[in-house]
C-alpha cells in the first residue's frame, strides 16, 4: 500500500481528494495536514484511522508518508511540491500545476532529480460529458471539425477567499481554465499554434482583482479553433460544449454531475445524467437528422486508481507532467495575449 499524506482539508481536500484516495486499491489515506485545528478535527471525524499534522515539515518528516497530495492555494504548489519531492516523496498536486512555465520546469526537474512520481489532479478528463464528446469525435459522425466551444458561464460575484486574488493564483483562467485547456490539449494536443485572449476586470476592487470574464481562442495545427469562455455575467448560461463540423453539430448543457454528488456525500459510483442535456444533429443525404445521445458515465476515481497502479504495478501514468507543462505554457500565453492585446504564437 502507498500511504498518502493529504495537505489541505478544505473543499478540495475533503470532497475531491480524500475519499477517492481511500477508494483506490493501492492507496491508503494515512495523514492529513492543515494549520486549522477545526479542519484537522473534521478530517479525524471522517477518517478516524489517520494521523494529523499542523505543519508541512512535520508531515514530510514522517517516513510512513510515501505520496504527498497538495490541495492548497495555487501559489503554494511549486514550492511545496519541490520541497516534498526533495524529501523523497511522490507528489500529486491539485490543478493548476503551478503559476508559470518556470515553476513547472522546476517541478519536473525535482521529480527527475529525486526519481519520484509527479502528476496533476486533472479529474475533468473523466467528466462524463467530456468522455461522451471524445467518443462522438472518434466516431467521426460530425465530419471535419471546425470549432469547439467549451464554456463555464454563471452569474454572480467573485469567489471568496484566496481565489479572488492574483497573488494567490486566483481567477477563472487558473481555475476552470486549467481544466478546459487540459481537455483541449487531450483532444488535439500536444501543442497549440496560436492563442488570443481577452480578459475583463469587472469586480469591485475591494472584493477581487482577478478577471470576471475571459474569452480565449486557441488554434491547433489541424485547423480546429477551440473557444473557451469563462465568467460570472451570464444569466442565460452558454452550452457546456458546442461543436460544429462539416456534417453536423453537437451541443450539451450543464456540467458533469459528479461534483454535486460528491458534495452530497456520494463517492465512487456512476452518476447518471439526463440525456435531454445532449443534442446531436447530423446532415444525412441532405436531410437534417436528430440523433439521440447516450451519456457516458464519468469516473473521477480513475485518476487515483491509476496513480496507485503506476506506483505499485508500473502502469503508465495517465496524467503526465510534461502534458501539464504544455497546459501551463498555453495559460502563460493566454495571460500574455490579454496583457498585450495581440495573438501569441507558440510554434
Image: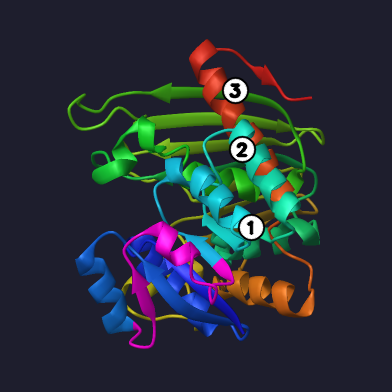
Question: Residue 104 placed where, x, y %?
Answer: 63, 40
Decide: few, some or many residues near mark 3? Use Cα within 10 Å; few <14, some 14-19, many ≥20: many
Residue at 38% across, 23% down: 200
Circles 1 and 2: CB atoms closer than 8 Å: no
Which residue, given by chain and number where applicable, does mark 2 sit on?
A: 328
Let me know if residue 51 is in the magenta part. yes
Q: Which residue range is magenta in the image?
A: 47-67
Decide: few, some or many residues near mark 1? Use Cα within 10 Å; few <14, some 14-19, many ≥20: many
User: Foreground mark, 1 or 3?
Assistant: 1
Query: What is the C-alpha distance between the residues marked 2 and 3?
Result: 15 Å
Look at the image and tell me in which quarter the N terminus lies.
bottom right
Classify residue 78 as left or right of residue 9.
right
Query: What is the C-alpha distance between the residues marked 1 and 2?
Result: 13 Å
Q: Quadrant of residue 299?
A: bottom right
* Of the pair 340 and 35, the residue shown nearer to us: 35
Decide: few, some or many residues near mark 2? Use Cα within 10 Å; few <14, some 14-19, many ≥20: many
Look at the image and tell me in which quarter the C terminus lies.
top right
Which residue, given by chain and number where applicable, does mark 3 sit on?
A: 196
Residue 272 visible, this angle: no
Classify residue 264 as left or right of residue 26.
left
Q: Quadrant of residue 193?
A: top right
Is residue 69 depicted above or below 302 in this figure?
above
First-in-chain label (1 vs 2): 1
Residue at 21% across, 24% down: 205
Residue 175: image tag: none
Amino acid at each position: 500500500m502507498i500511504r498518502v499524506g493529504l495537505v489541505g482539508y478544505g473543499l478540495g481536500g475533503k470532497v475531491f481528494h480524500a475519499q477517492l484516495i481511500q477508494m483506490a486499491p493501492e492507496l491508503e489515506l494515512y495523514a492529513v495536514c492543515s494549520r486549522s485545528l477545526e479542519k484537522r478535527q473534521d478530517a479525524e471525524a471522517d477518517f478516524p484511522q489517520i494521523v494529523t499534522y499542523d505543519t508541512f515539515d512535520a508531515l514530510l518528516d514522517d517516513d510512513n508518508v510515501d505520496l504527498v497530495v497538495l490541495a492548497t492555494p495555487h501559489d503554494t504548489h511549486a514550492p511545496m511540491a519541490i520541497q516534498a519531492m526533495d524529501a523523497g516523496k511522490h507528489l500529486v498536486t491539485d490543478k493548476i500545476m503551478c503559476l508559470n512555465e518556470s515553476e513547472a520546469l522546476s517541478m519536473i526537474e525535482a521529480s527527475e532529480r529525486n526519481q519520484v512520481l509527479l502528476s496533476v489532479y486533472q479529474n475533468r478528463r473523466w467528466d462524463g460529458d467530456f468522455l461522451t464528446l471524445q467518443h462522438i469525435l472518434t466516431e467521426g459522425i460530425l465530419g471535419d471539425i471546425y470549432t469547439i466551444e467549451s464554456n463555464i458561464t454563471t452569474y454572480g460575484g467573485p469567489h471568496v477567499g484566496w481565489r479572488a486574488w492574483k497573488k494567490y493564483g486566483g481567477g477563472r483562467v487558473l481555475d476552470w481554465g486549467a481544466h478546459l485547456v487540459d481537455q483541449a490539449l487531450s483532444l488535439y494536443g500536444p501543442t497549440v499554434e496560436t492563442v488570443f485572449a481577452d480578459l475583463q476586470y469587472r469586480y469591485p476592487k475591494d472584493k477581487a482583482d482577478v478577471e470576471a470574464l475571459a474569452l480565449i481562442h486557441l488554434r491547433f495545427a489541424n485547423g480546429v479553433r477551440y473557444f473557451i469562455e469563462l465568467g460570472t455575467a451570464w444569466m442565460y448560461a452558454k452550452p457546456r460544449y458546442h461543436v460544429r463540423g462539416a456534417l453536423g453539430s453537437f451541443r450539451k448543457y450543464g456540467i458533469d454531475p459528479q461534483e454535486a454528488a460528491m458534495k452530497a456525500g456520494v463517492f465512487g459510483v456512476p452518476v447518471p445524467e439526463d440525456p435531454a442535456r445532449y443534442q446531436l444533429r447530423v446532415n444525412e443525404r441532405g436531410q437534417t437528422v436528430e440523433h439521440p445521445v447516450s451519456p457516458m458515465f464519468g469516473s473521477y476515481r480513475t485518476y487515483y486508481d491509476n496513480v496507485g497502479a503506476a506506483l505499485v504495478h508500473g502502469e503508465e501514468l495517465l496524467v503526465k507532467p510534461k502534458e501539464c507543462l504544455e497546459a501551463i505554457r498555453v495559460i502563460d500565453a493566454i495571460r500574455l495575449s490579454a496583457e498585450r492585446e495581440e495573438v501569441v504564437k507558440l510554434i
